[in-house]
Amino acid sequence: QQQQQQPTVAMLLSGGVDSSVALNILTRQGYNVTAFYLKIWLEDELAHLGQCPWEDDYRVCQEVCEQAGVPLESISLQDEYR
């Protein structure tokens, strides 16, 4: 009996628990998942903080995708948010 392949799913990862769990559920259900991280932080607005909070979020996304065997693409939307 031929097994039907699940569709491909594009999903956004934030680095938080909800999107990480959703990614794991989709992969366990056999979906072919590609994850995307949207970089929207405006670095000039964050210069006074002395840190880039998106870097920690992105690192978490990388780890989650590596564990799940899912590709991760980063998309910069910083210009669009100006």
Image: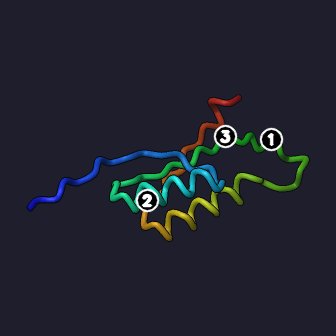
Task: Tell which tag, 1 or 2, sits nearer the viewer.
Answer: 2
Marks 1,3: beta carbons within 8 A:
no
Point 43% across, 61% down: residue: 70
Marks 2 and 3 sit apart, C-alpha to C-alpha, by 20 Å
Q: Which residue is mark 3?
A: 40
Q: Identify the mark at residue 28; answer none if there is no mark.
A: none
Report which quarter residue 78 is drawn in.
top right
Instruction: From the top left corner, tell me how far across and down residue 37 is, in percent.
Output: 56, 49
Q: Identify the mark at residue 71; answer none if there is no mark.
A: 2
Q: Give amino acid for label 3.
A: Ile
Q: Give amino acid for label 1.
A: Asp
27 with respect to 14 (left or right):
left
Report which quarter residue 46 is drawn in.
top right
Q: Give amino acid for label 2.
A: Pro
Report which quarter residue 62 is drawn in.
bottom right
53 with respect to 60 (left or right):
right
Marks 2,3: beta carbons within 8 A:
no
Instruction: From the top left corner, tell me how far across and down residue 82 is, in percent.
Output: 71, 29
Q: Residue furthest bottom?
A: 67
Marks 1,2: beta carbons within 8 A:
no
Q: Identify the mark at residue 44; answer none if there is no mark.
A: 1
SS at circle 3: loop
